[in-house]
Amino acid sequence: MESMRDINRVMEREIAKGSCPLKLDHIEFGDYSYQEITSKEKLLEVLSYLLRIGDFKQYAGKTILNNVYMDLRGKKPVFKRTRTAMERNNIFSTIRRYAKKLKPQYNGDVYLEMVRCYFDIPQENLEKCRYTYQGNETYAFLMSDNYIMALYTHCLVARKEAAMQDMQVDGFTEKEYGMVRLENVGDVLFQALLLDDVKWNGVRMIANLYVIYTINCVK
């Protein structure tokens, strides 16, 4: 991975070219963060939802182009945006084959993690992003491929840093705290930052980072 200094330089160059200057402020865990995947069928359903294919293809609007997905090149994970449903179906097939090789038992060893990512934007830039769509006031954040990939890198770094913090979340089990700390986490089966389903809380833009883990030790 490039140094964060290099990543930030890329972001500054892309802002100068016209990318919206969104910047990651922080990430959050909550009672929504962990969902056990209890069967192969459930795993394929979750993958289909994240990739907006199959029964979930109706969610594949124009902004799906902004999503960042994990794929595999050989045994190495790569992260990319997609342009077509065929590309997303190819990722689905690759991850399905990868899951088959890992041979999960679905007895507490596969989890979906969802982390909320909060992004800031200067007020003067926010006003430029405001527009009316079908009679409703909303926002459009235009960003280049390089800028989106840089934001994704910031999210991954923030997630790794969270593992080293003494985080307290109401209602978390010890197993869930272990996943926050990345203890006993085995393989990352899939990962995605979904920027086609963002929320605005009046202060910051919120997007979800999803990771599917296998767990090495089950208590």
Image: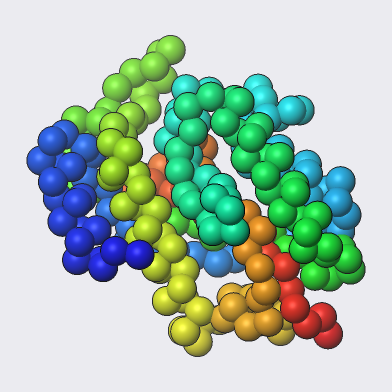
Residue 132 lies in quadrant = top left
Looking at the image, residue 190 sits to the left or right of residue 136; the answer is right
* Residue at horizontal 59 percent and vertical 25 percent from the top: 85
Question: Which residue is the extreme one toward the top?
Answer: 134
On screen, residue 166 above or below 52: below
Looking at the image, residue 198 sits to the left or right of residue 109; the answer is left
Question: Which residue is the extreme one toward the left?
Answer: 16
Which sits in the foreground, 98 or 174?
98
Viewport quadrant of the N terminus: bottom left
* Residue at horizontal 80 percent and vertical 70 percent from the top: 109
Is any atom of residue 100 visible in this view?
Answer: yes
Which sits in the foreground, 124 or 41?
41
* Residue at horizontal 55 percent and vertical 66 percent from the top: 29
On screen, residue 101 above or below 147: below
* Residue at horizontal 42 percent and vertical 76 percent from the top: 161
On screen, residue 13 above or below 212: above
Find residue 114 and report its horizontal and vertical position in percent. 60, 58
Find residue 142 and report its horizontal and vertical position in percent. 29, 32
Question: Which residue is the extreme one toward the front?
Answer: 74
Find residue 187 and report its horizontal and vertical position in percent. 66, 68
Viewport quadrant of the C terminus: bottom right
Is any atom of residue 114 visible in this view?
Answer: no
Which color scheme does this rendered protein use? rainbow
Which sits in the foreground, 29 or 45?
45
